[in-house]
């Protein structure tokens, strides 16, 4: 049975590296709080794509240990054996209390599941893993903090994650660990170090065609109208740099069921001000490159190398910075504003 939607690039990268045995522990970072497939957030997408696994376990400090399917709860309890207190009464209380939430207690249980042997269909065939562990908000479990400021339990968690990633026994099971964080820099330096064997994979912001397909679907789904002359492609261009959930928010807030170019710009500016506070000032120039005389070769280069990738949502494809060098009065500031 084939999947009805194309495989996202980040997932293809993860699967390729996993098959090549580059690592069995990965950290997904970047646009991880967005729709990563039509109608699916990251955890749901992972559960769908790895549905053949016997156990799909999610963990974060707030919700504790949860599962993709209710039936997996009992299977997990069969696989893991929580340490039993010597006092029978305390053991009974522990049984009734459910699965622990604190990392120091939860990670040893997850490790037992990760050591569940994989399945080899025939001699020489690849081992098929039975367990997927997804640790969301992993920066709260392994924060970017000096060792001296960490509790002994927090230091134990850092060591545990390193040990999982480098453990040859876990590697042979075919089981998989996925850490999730929006900002890779929020993770402890040891966890994101190349020597940790934890492989980072970046989830990018949606590209132009992804935004266009999403906008077209939202127009049909919400029944909103676009102002005369405004097209779905125009909105997709205007929303470059926004995740799909915030584009969805624009449609949800549309007054009188009409979306205008001015409204899209206003919402995008509000989002930028909220997201970046005083770090970024949004400027709206009154003219574009067409108002700049001469410099045809430079303008053509800027269109291709800067404006096109940014409009298509490919921030990594544009240069990090450009320096205009020349005598005063030659148009450097005007050219920069026009871009």
Image (tube, rainbow, N blue to C red):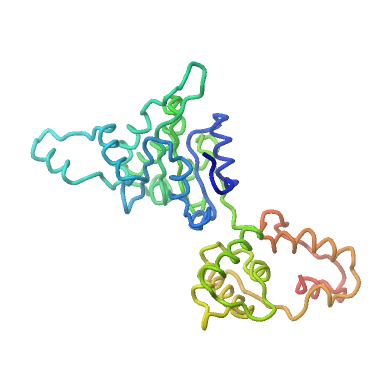
> What residue lies at 85% left-to-right and 75% top-to-bottom?
292
Task: Tell me where residue 47 sits by quadrant.
Answer: top left
Q: Nearer the viewer, residue 138 or 190?
A: 138
**Picture coordinates of residue 203 (x, y %)?**
56, 51
Residue extending furthest bottom? Answer: 256
Compared with residue 28, is residue 283 higher up or lower down, i.e. above or below? below
Q: Residue at x 57, y 64 (%)?
A: 217
165 sits to left or right of 77:
right
Q: Percent position (x, y) of residue 310? A: 69, 62
Residue 177 picture location, percent across and down:
44, 38
Residue that protrudes farthest toward the top in the picture: 123
**Above or below — where is 32 with respect to 22?**
below
| Whether residue 44 is visible | yes
Q: How many marks?
A: 0
* Residue pictured at 47% horizontal, 54% vertical: 41
Which quadrant would residue 205 be assigned to in this image? bottom right
Q: Quadrant of the C terminus?
A: bottom right
Provide residue 226's location: percent of width, then percent of height: 61, 77
Which of 189/197 is in front?
197
Looking at this view, is 304 or 231 the one in front?
231
Q: Nearer the viewer, residue 14 or 339?
A: 14
Which quadrant of the structure image shows residue 15?
top right
Task: State left or right for residue 205 relative to residue 141.
Answer: right
**Residue drawn at (58%, 75%) of the image:** 269
Residue 144 visible to the viewer? no
Left or right of 198, for residue 97? left
């Amino acid at each position: 049975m084939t999947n009805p939607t194309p495989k996202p690039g980040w997932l293809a990268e993860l699967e390729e590296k996993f098959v090549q045995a580059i690592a069995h522990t990965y950290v997904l970072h970047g646009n991880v709080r967005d729709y990563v497939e039509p109608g699916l957030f990251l955890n749901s997408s992972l559960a769908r794509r790895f549905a053949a696994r016997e156990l799909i376990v999610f963990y974060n400090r707030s919700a504790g240990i949860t599962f993709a399917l209710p039936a997996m709860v009992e299977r997990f309890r069969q696989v893991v054996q929580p340490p039993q207190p010597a006092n029978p009464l305390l053991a009974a209380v522990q049984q009734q209390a459910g699965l622990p939430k604190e990392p120091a207690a939860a990670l040893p249980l997850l490790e037992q599941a990760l050591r569940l042997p994989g399945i080899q269909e025939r001699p020489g065939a690849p081992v098929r893993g039975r367990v997927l562990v997804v640790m969301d908000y992993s920066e709260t479990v392994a924060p970017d903090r000096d060792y001296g400021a960490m509790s002994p339990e927090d230091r134990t968690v850092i060591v545990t994650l390193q040990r999982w990633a480098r453990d040859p026994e876990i590697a042979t099971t075919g089981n998989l660990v996925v850490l999730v964080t929006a900002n890779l820099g929020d993770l402890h330096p040891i966890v994101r170090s190349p020597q940790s064997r934890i492989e980072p994979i970046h989830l990018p912001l949606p590209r132009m065609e992804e935004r266009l397909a999403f906008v077209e679907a939202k127009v049909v789904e919400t029944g909103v109208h676009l102002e005369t002359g405004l097209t779905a492609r125009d909105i997709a261009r205007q929303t470059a740099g926004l995740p799909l959930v915030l584009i969805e928010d624009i449609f949800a807030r549309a007054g009188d069921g009409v979306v205008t170019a001015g409204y899209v710009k206003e919402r995008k500016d509000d989002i930028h001000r909220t997201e970046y506070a005083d770090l970024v000032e949004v400027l709206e120039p009154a003219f574009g490159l067409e108002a700049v005389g001469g410099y045809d070769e430079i303008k053509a280069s800027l269109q291709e190398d800067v404006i096109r990738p940014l409009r298509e949502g490919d921030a990594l494809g544009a240069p990090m910075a450009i320096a205009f060098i020349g005598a005063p009065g030659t148009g450097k500031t005007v050219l920069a504003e026009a871009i």
